[in-house]
């Protein structure tokens, strides 16, 4: 149901550094984005085909103070206007997380403000309800809501029955959807990150060109490892054969059909994600379906999910592209609802327990530590 109780007026400063984006944002009342600054490192890591953890943590150290200054200036606020500080505490790269987490705790201590740690996945969920001048009609939270979290490290279906109240319905048993996109992108010789480049290549291809498997283990679980292997086997058929040192050279084969492989792979991933989402939405009679995480930026996933629920009574929402990837506005937004419940976190340097998304069998998310 929609939140009807009187809520506190709070302006929260959020910090996000779980991977390769140094981000700080200011959000008012859990909904209104006053600023959302992101310093991306994608150009630095692209040469490695993925994130280089040590380099990421060093770049966070260099970027975080200037990003804070810009976030406060863009929001037009001073420390006297800030009511609390929040930061991502996990999951993510340990070296990256410690920079943002300890920076945020230091700022909170220096300014005498309450601090709260936010799980990265919870931030992705709350990105759906954020509003700014470009998105003044952002949806209001309504429960029960079904959230499909799809990112580089996560693929989960979560039933949300209220603010900070979750039930894990299903999760990946092996590779996450975003991880599969990145690895297939690498197989096809596409730049990092793989997701947007696979989508772009797939726009020129035939999604029916290759009959890739749709693995559907359990009722709401996912599996993408077999699909990734199926793409590899097809790519191998187009790899030049023979010994490169042979004077006659390798035996040449047909050019790799990158566009058709990308389109067929993407179609298989989207089919499984949407089928599981529709099944869960019907079984639990939800009021909203929300996409969250980096793969929620995928155009075919957005379009197919909307089409699957078209004509029904369940609206489908997904964040703007800038809020699909890692950002601090989502962290500040999630923190507001935790703070509204009276929750606070310690300023000690000890690890904060992770958010537990648990299903009926006691299983937790694959990547929880």
Image: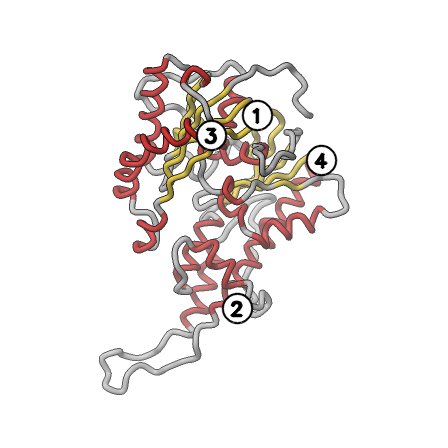
Rendered location of residue 263, percent (x, y): 54, 63
Residue at left offset 30%, top offset 31% = 99
Of marks 2 and 3, which one's residue comes earlier in the chain?
2
CB under 8 Å between callouts 2 and 3? no
> Whole-Å distance between the Cαs marked 1 and 2?
42 Å
Q: Which residue is mark 4?
A: 285
> Whole-Å distance between the Cαs marked 4 and 1?
17 Å
CB under 8 Å between callouts 1 and 3? no
Q: Which residue is mark 1?
A: 165
Instruction: Tell me which colouring the rendered structure shows.
Output: secondary structure
Disc 3 packing (10 Å; few <14; some 14–19; many ≥20)? many
Of marks 1 and 3, which one's residue comes earlier in the chain?
1
- Quarter of the image with the C terminus is top left
Q: Which residue is mark 3?
A: 331
154 vs 80: above or below: below
Q: Is residue 57 visible?
A: yes
Q: Nearer the viewer, mark 3 or mark 4?
A: 3
Of marks 1 and 2, which one's residue comes earlier in the chain?
1
Q: Nearer the viewer, mark 1 or mark 2?
A: 2
């Amino acid at each position: 149901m929609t939140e009807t109780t009187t809520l506190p007026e709070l302006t929260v400063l959020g910090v996000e550094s779980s991977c390769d984006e140094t981000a700080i944002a200011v959000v008012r009342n859990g909904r209104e984005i006053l600023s959302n600054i992101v310093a991306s490192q994608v150009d630095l890591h692209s040469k490695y085909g993925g994130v280089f953890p040590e380099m990421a943590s060093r770049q966070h150290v260099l970027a975080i103070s200037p990003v804070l200054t810009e976030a406060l200036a863009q929001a037009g606020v001073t420390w006297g206007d800030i009511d609390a500080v929040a930061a991502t505490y996990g999951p993510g790269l340990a070296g990256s997380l410690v920079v943002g987490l300890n920076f945020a705790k230091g700022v909170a201590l220096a300014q005498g403000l309450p601090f709260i740690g936010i799980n990265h996945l919870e931030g992705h969920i709350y990105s759906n309800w954020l509003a700014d001048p470009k998105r003044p009609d952002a949806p209001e939270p309504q429960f029960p809501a079904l959230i499909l979290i799809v990112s580089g490290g996560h693929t989960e279906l979560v039933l949300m029955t209220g603010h900070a109240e979750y039930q894990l319905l299903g999760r990946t048993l092996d590779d996450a959807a975003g991880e599969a996109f990145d690895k297939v992108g690498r197989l096809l010789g596409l730049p990092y990150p793989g997701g947007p480049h696979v989508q772009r290549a797939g726009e020129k291809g035939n999604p029916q060109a290759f009959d890739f498997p749709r693995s559907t283990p359990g009722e709401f679980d996912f599996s993408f490892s077999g699909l990734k292997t199926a793409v590899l086997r097809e790519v191998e058929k187009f790899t030049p054969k023979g010994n490169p040192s042979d004077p006659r050279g390798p035996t040449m084969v047909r050019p790799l059909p990158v566009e058709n492989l990308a389109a067929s792979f993407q179609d298989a991933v989207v089919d499984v994600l949407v089928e599981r989402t529709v099944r869960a939405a019907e079984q639990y009679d939800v009021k909203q379906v929300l996409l969250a995480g980096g793969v929620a930026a995928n155009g075919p996933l957005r379009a197919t999910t909307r089409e699957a629920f078209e004509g029904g009574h369940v609206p489908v929402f997904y964040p703007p592209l800038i809020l699909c990837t890692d950002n601090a506005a989502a962290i500040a937004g999630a923190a507001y609802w935790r703070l509204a419940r009276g929750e606070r976190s310690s300023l000690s340097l000890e690890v904060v327990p992770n958010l537990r998304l648990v299903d009926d069998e006691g299983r937790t998310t694959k990547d929880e530590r």
